[in-house]
Image (cartoon, grey):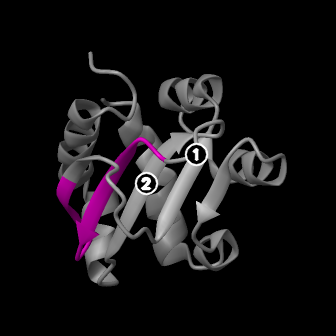
Amino acid sequence: MADLFSAEWMQAFGKQWNAEPELADALAKIHFNSAIAYGFVDDPNPMGVLIVEEGRVVSAGSYEGQNLNWDLRADRDHWQQWKTKGLNMMGLGMAYMSRKLQFRVGDYTAMIQDPRMAKPFIKSFSVIGRV
């Protein structure tokens, strides 16, 4: 399989995202539009990006300087752990507080306080595990 967050991997992630009603349909209901980047804490820039319109991924690939609404970073071991085991609300809170998951761009507090966004965000980690 393609390397985590490579263009090929991001395209597969985008397809899985769109196929998951608890993610794509839930975000469509709140008219969610965002550019979401993923990468590693030690890198200056994220590796991959999803462009989401009305809850659905319309573009997925390598980060090429796009303006971002979200930039999520962790080390490779933690991404792999979450890819394998997923992440729940408690784990998300612990990962954020310990800086294992970093939001370089985006408002974690606002997102986590809105169940219409928090639930799909948590679901995205199980979708990562399908790629």
Which residue is under mark 2?
37
The one of 69 and 121 positioned closer to us in this rendering:
69
- Mark 2 or mark 1, which has the lower sequence index? 2
Q: Is residue 12 magenta?
A: no
Q: Position of residue 62 (x, y in %)?
A: 29, 44
Q: Main secondary structure of the magenta part?
A: strand
- Which residue sits at x=27%, y=66%? 52
In the figure, is residue 42 to the left or right of 106? Answer: right
Q: Quadrant of residue 4?
A: top left
**Above or below, 66 relative to 12:** below
**Above or below, 107 relative to 86:** below
Nearest to the eye among marks 2 and 1: give it. 1
Q: Quadrant of residue 12?
A: top left
The one of 71 and 130 positioned closer to us in this rendering:
71
In the figure, is residue 111 to the left or right of 109? Answer: left
Which residue is under mark 1?
44
- Which residue sits at x=32%, y=30%? 130
Q: Position of residue 105 (x, y in %)?
A: 58, 66
Q: In the rendered picture of this protein, how many numbered marks are placed on residues?
A: 2
Q: Residues within 10 Å of mark 1 (few under 14, many from 20)?
A: few
Image quadrant in which the N terminus is located? top left
Amino acid beneath label 1: Pro
| Residue lying at the far top of the rendered structure | 1
Amino acid beneath label 2: Ala
- Which residue sits at x=52%, y=58%? 71
Q: Position of residue 83 (x, y in %)?
A: 48, 29
Q: Which residues are magenta?
A: 46-59
Question: Which element is circle 1 on?
Answer: loop
**Above or below, 10 relative to 80:** below
Question: Which element is circle 2 on?
Answer: strand
Q: Residues within 10 Å of mark 2 (few under 14, many from 20)?
A: many
